[in-house]
Amino acid sequence: MRIIKLSSMDIDFPDRPSVDEYFNVKLHNRNPVGQFLFTQGRIAEGGISTNEPIIFSYKKEITHIAKAASGRIVNTGEDAGIYPFYFIVDISTICLAQGNLADVEDALVSAEIYKNIVHTQGWPLIPDSLEVNQIWKDLKRKDRNSGDVSQVTDHQT
């Protein structure tokens, strides 16, 4: 599982509503669809894999979860100087999420996984396990009226 911390310093995320717009519109309109650009040093070669669960946060709030549809890919586009790499987000798996990074860290500690995720600037990688997968699934935002999962797109796991 990878935790990706979206930054208000990034042009795509100046405020919280822009985060939702990014997941609802921008990722769908990228070429290739789901292209998530990132800067040097964020994810090492081989550091993300197809079907890997991802948690996206903004200012310590968990906003979305999804799965990767690729590993790290070299960006050859015009913005490669700023964003030399990307991976593909499987847009069919994007779901609204709830909670904050401290909640995730506490859940990891309860599973005896000790990883500082709140007070680090990096994008932590958490080794796969049944407990970690359940923590990821539990982040899906529940609709208050029906108990159903609120979805940005059709969700398939």
Image (spheres, helix red, strand yellow):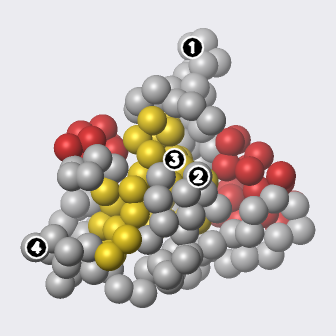
Which label lies toward us, 2 or 3?
Answer: 2
96 vs 114: above or below? above
The disc placed on residue 6 is: none
Q: CA distance from mark 2 to mark 3?
A: 9 Å
Crowd rating for badge 3 (residues with CA inside 10 Å; few <14, some 14–19, many 20+): many
Residue that extends furthest to the top in the rendered view of this protein: 146
Determine contact: label 3, label 4, CB under 8 Å. Answer: no
Query: Are the residues at dot 2 and dot 1 in contact (C-beta closer than 8 Å)?
Result: no
Q: Which residue in the protein does label 1 denote? A: 145
What amino acid type is highlighted by mark number 1? Asn
Q: Is residue 81 above or below residue 98?
A: below
Give the mark toward the camera: 3 or 4: 4
What amino acid type should be assigned to the residue bearing mark 3?
Answer: Ala
Residue visible at 80% across and 75% down in the picture:
114
The amino acid on which the numbered mark 4 sits, given as a three-letter code, is: Glu
Question: Could you say where residue 134 lies in the image, as x and y percent from the top left?
Answer: 77, 46
